[in-house]
Amino acid sequence: MSDTPARSKPVPRKAAYHHGDLATALIDAGEAELREKGIEGFSLRGVAKRAGVSHAAPAHHFGDTNGLLTALAARGFERFLARQDDFKRAAAPDPRAQLSAAGVGYVNFALENPALFRLMFSSDRPEFETAVLDQAATQGFMTLVDGVSQITGTDPWADSAAMRQVSATWAIAHGVADLLVSGRLKIVGGMDPQTRNAEIAAMIDPVIPAAR
Amino acid sequence: MSDTPARSKPVPRKAAYHHGDLATALIDAGEAELREKGIEGFSLRGVAKRAGVSHAAPAHHFGDTNGLLTALAARGFERFLARQDDFKRAAAPDPRAQLSAAGVGYVNFALENPALFRLMFSSDRPEFETAVLDQAATQGFMTLVDGVSQITGTDPWADSAAMRQVSATWAIAHGVADLLVSGRLKIVGGMDPQTRNAEIAAMIDPVIPAAR
DNA sequence: CGGCGAATCTAGACACTGTCAAGTTATCTT
DNA sequence: AAGATAACTTGACAGTGTCTAGATTCGCCG
């Protein structure tokens, strides 16, 4: 979406005063800061220092700290969906296997990006009303609704039992992810990745709706 | 536990300089601060101001901010378990109904104390190695293990399938709670309490193990 | 090609935060 | 009654987010 070679941005410079593409550089730096310090140690000045600019530079691109966190969360949701797609592609094509794979991808993303996951789901700081973030955050739910719909052959928006299955599927994946991120479920957390994913699937699968 | 009339504390004073029982007063103030400002707006100086003492007074009782948050989390877990017991007492005595009620209590506590719930499950700030907090946090898991054990007649510590059912039960309750707290699951969140609890139970119950 | 408006970034200041050190006041012990 | 100890205050320091004003560079229009 942002890879039009000319035009969009004047190609990153090595310039001194004008950075060239500071906005994305700040997002990169912010992601590193988040990963290393966690949400609760996240500092806007620290991000600026990482990017090699003055402490007030981020404000011009993101307004305030929450603005940058909003951008980070939006990018997080994109990667989140991409990670689920990774697991889907590696799974059998039938709808139940696809939904199960998405769930395992959900949990794996959380384990791979714990601080980002918390920013996306357990923080009040990102402004979720922002168009770009709201859309990114909603899209995952839409594909989930779609997945259940393909299995059951019903429209969850019109069938409250199907919508309940949507919620339950989401909840089991999210619950496993969040408990693992916060260091609970130590038994599962300590497994090697392969058997761990099998264990995760074994927890999720019973909740996934049966084919109609 | 702390209601021995004499001895334990010199009975709250109206004194000026020495507060009498500042430690619990700070926990009360801290809980109010947490409720109103959330974790991310929590300020130790704000807590001191609420309690009417100087900004450095809390340090003498709790060390640093994380020390107070640790105490808050510990008290949170006590209330958490008590709230689950409330729901258990109001439910049928058979083991499955008891476990289901505990799950609904789990979610209700989260909805009633969103910031405290996040402190307990989505924050790195409390020191979970602290004896009092570690014990309080572990106790819930123990009763959960016990509940599954009573239903299945097996010992989850010796039966990996039963332990998986423990994890899954925890995960579905936790997932529903966390998604509701963070404002996802708007459909469920918007219901009136009674039908909402029925909906929560309907999501949880299929995950609860069947009787042996 | 030159200059001018606008975008980009820096520098400084302010109020606020958590934490530390030193001093003050009350309680407890003997 | 006096000295020791615990409880609390005051002041200071570095770090934070955000605001303002100023400096630098880019892009465009002539």
Image: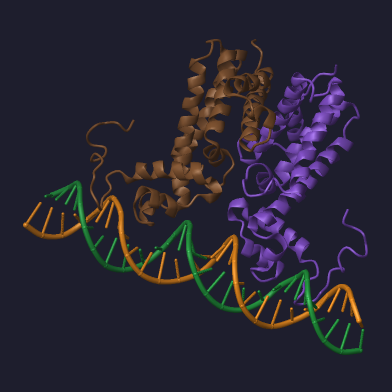
Chain colours: A purple, B brown, C green, D orange
Q: Quadrant of residue C23?
A: bottom left
Left or right of residue A20: residue A39: left
Instruction: Work out whether B93 lies above or below A20.
Output: above
Residue at the spot 73% in from the left edge and 45% down from the top edge: A112
Instruction: Work out whether B89 lies above or below A22.
Output: above
Instruction: Work out whether C2 lies above or below A21.
Output: below
Residue at the spot 48% in from the left edge and 16% down from the top edge: B89
B37 or C26: nearer the eye? Answer: B37
In the rendered image, residue A194, in percent from the top left (x then y), is placed at 78, 36
Residue at the spot 63% in from the left edge and 52% down from the top edge: A38
Residue at the spot 84% in from the left edge and 21% down from the top edge: A154
In the rendered image, residue B171, in percent from the top left (x then y), is placed at 65, 29
Left or right of residue D19: residue A134: right
Left or right of residue A3: residue A36: left
Answer yes or no: is residue B127 visible.
no
In the rendered image, residue B153, in percent from the top left (x then y), is placed at 60, 13
